[in-house]
């Protein structure tokens, strides 16, 4: 299959966004080690600004770019393989972990020193396992012999209902 410039650009954007998303998902739980009851007002304000702005202005936009460019690549390349479905399941888990980290940030903001966050290792371990799983699936592209229905493995030529605005 011929690879076009647009495919290369989207692939570069996707890989870059995934790498930045992974760094953010690893960095934020490590920052939670600095959060503890009894922080001074200045230390708490620095912690709060750093975690909030990192999540809202960096991590979430990078995650949206990663998922969006991934969807574009799937549609451009027409890849409908079982390994890709496994990868998408792992990306969904990554999104759940992303949301959980956001929940932890909200807890630190709303309770100001009274909440005890779980150990960062309890968040880092699943994040790292999911990231390694995604990497293995993408690089190895294993042949998964799944007996899935045809409509799940091949594009269909169905038209959208009339009520769908396009």
Image (cartoon, helix red, strand yellow):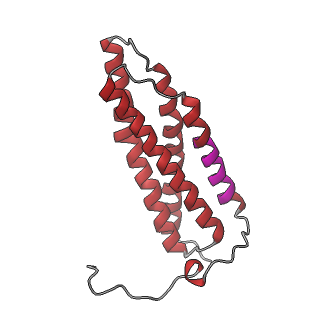
Where is residue 44? Give x, y as percent: 34, 18
Viewer-closest of 114 and 26: 114
Magenta segment range? 127-138
Residue 145 picture quarter? bottom right
User: Main structural element of the magenta stretch: helix, strand or loop?
Assistant: helix
Left or right of 10, for residue 137: right
Q: Residue sitting at 30 percent across and 29 percent down? A: 110
Q: Nearer the viewer, residue 25 or 76?
A: 25
Residue 16 visible from this viewpoint: no
Please tell me which residue is depicted at 54% across the width and 27% down the height of the picture: 119
Q: Is residue 118 visible?
A: yes
Can you give x and y, in whole percent of width and height, for residue 65 in the image? 42, 54
x then y, percent, for residue 112:
32, 21
Q: Residue at x 53, y 60 (%)?
A: 11
Quadrant where the N terminus sits is bottom right
Q: As displayed, is residue 115 above or below residue 158?
A: above
| Quarter residue 106 falls in | top left
Asked which quadrant contains residue 50, the reply is: top left
153 sits to left or right of 73: right
């Amino acid at each position: 299959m011929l690879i076009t410039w647009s495919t290369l650009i989207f692939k570069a954007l996707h890989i870059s966004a995934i790498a930045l998303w992974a760094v953010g998902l690893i960095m934020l739980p490590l920052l939670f080690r600095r959060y503890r009851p009894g922080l001074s007002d200045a230390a708490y304000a620095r912690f709060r600004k750093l975690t909030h702005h990192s999540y809202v202005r960096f991590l979430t936009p990078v995650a949206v770019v990663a998922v969006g460019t991934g969807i574009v690549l799937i549609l451009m390349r027409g890849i409908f393989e079982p390994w890709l479905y496994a990868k998408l399941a792992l990306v969904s888990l990554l999104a759940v972990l992303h949301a959980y980290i956001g929940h932890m940030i909200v807890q630190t903001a709303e309770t100001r020193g009274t909440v005890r966050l779980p150990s960062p290792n309890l968040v880092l371990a699943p994040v790292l396992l999911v990231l390694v799983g995604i990497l293995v699936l993408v690089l190895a592209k294993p042949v998964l012999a799944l007996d899935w229905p045809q409509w799940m493995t091949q594009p269909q030529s169905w038209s959208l209902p009339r009520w769908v605005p396009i």
